[in-house]
């Protein structure tokens, strides 16, 4: 209410089919919100806030150029464990202490996988998906609220229907991109030695000396990948 007048404030939308698919099979979740303005007050309270590493690097390279520093920053962002992240930060400090001092105050939970909360099943470092979604609803955003919501819903419905049709062409149970990742992981698994420790848990050691815990029951690994 705005005084005695009713006004639209904000709204969160999540399609039920997407929600059930995420809960039952960790399928991609599509959710969006309509707010009066983008500021701290309108952010979803419990949402984890992350930086797009590409944009983060654009700010970084203005003061600290060079391919070596770029590679170290991206290695730190892609690190999936705290120890791996610390190793990259030490590399950065040895390469350029000035760059290390610039990066040190930046909270790693906003830009490195090693510090992301595991309750959120997303490890993306770029906001390409958000930008692609925003570009697909540009025309809808100029419409009144109800027409805008209906336009976005229809857009998502058609998108999911097209993806469903495309899936019929798959030769295996997953798409070609995921299939390539699975095959690559199969090859890399040949360099690992598993030892059963009980209750569907394994101690896995790789040829580089890394040692991790794999739990088949929870489908998790301490490497966090």
Image: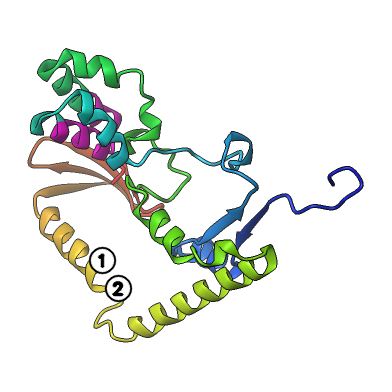
The vertical placement of 221 against 66, above or below, is below
Q: Nearer the viewer, residue 111 or 224?
A: 111
For the residue labelled by badge 2, is the local secondary structure a helix, a strand or a loop? loop
Q: Position of residue 37 (x, y in %)?
A: 61, 44
How many residues crowd around disc 1 within 10 Å: few (fewer than 14), some, or many (20 or more)? few
Q: Is residue 154 above or below residue 189?
A: below
24 sits to left or right of 109: right
Crowd around label 2: few <14 · some 14–19 · many ≥20 (10 Å): few
For the point 42% across and 61% down, the residue is 135
Magenta highlight: main SS: helix
**What residue is at 17 percent from the left and 13 percent from the top?**
97
What residue span does the magenta drawing correspond to?
A: 70-86
Q: Of 1 and 93, which appears nearest the observer?
A: 1
In the image, is residue 23 part of the stretch drawn in magenta?
A: no
Foreground pick, 11 / 28: 11
Identify the residue under disc 2: 174
Locate residue 46 relative to residue 92 in the image: left or right.
right
Q: CA distance from mark 1 to mark 2?
A: 6 Å
Going by the image, does 3 lie left or right of 119? right
The residue lying furthest to the front in this view is: 142
| Residue 61 screen position, x and y as percent | 20, 30
Q: Quadrant of residue 117?
A: top left
Up/down of 151 relative to 101, above or below = below
User: Which mark is on residue 178?
Assistant: 1
Task: Tell me the residue at 53%/67% (across/down).
Answer: 18
């Amino acid at each position: 209410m705005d005084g005695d007048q009713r006004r639209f404030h904000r709204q969160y939308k999540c399609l039920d089919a997407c929600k059930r698919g995420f809960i039952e099979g960790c399928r991609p979740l599509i959710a969006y919100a309509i707010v009066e303005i983008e500021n701290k007050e309108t952010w979803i309270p419990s949402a984890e806030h992350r930086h797009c590493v590409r944009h983060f690097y654009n700010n970084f390279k203005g003061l600290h150029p060079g391919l070596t520093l770029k590679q170290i920053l991206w290695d730190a962002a892609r690190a999936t464990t705290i120890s791996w992240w610390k190793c990259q930060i030490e590399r950065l400090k040895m390469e350029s202490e000035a760059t290390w001092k610039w990066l040190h105050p930046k909270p790693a939970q906003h830009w490195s996988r090693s510090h992301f909360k595991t309750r959120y099943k997303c490890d993306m470092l770029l906001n390409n998906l958000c930008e692609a979604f925003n570009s697909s609803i540009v025309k809808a955003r100029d419409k009144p609220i109800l027409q805008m919501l209906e336009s976005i819903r229809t857009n998502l419905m058609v998108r999911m229907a097209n993806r469903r049709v495309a899936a019929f062409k798959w030769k295996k149970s997953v798409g070609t991109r995921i299939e390539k990742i699975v095959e690559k992981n199969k090859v890399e698994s040949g360099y690992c030695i598993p030892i059963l420790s009980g209750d569907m848990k394994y101690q896995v050691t790789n040829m580089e000396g890394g040692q991790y815990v794999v739990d088949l029951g929870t489908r998790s690994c301490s490497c966090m990948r």
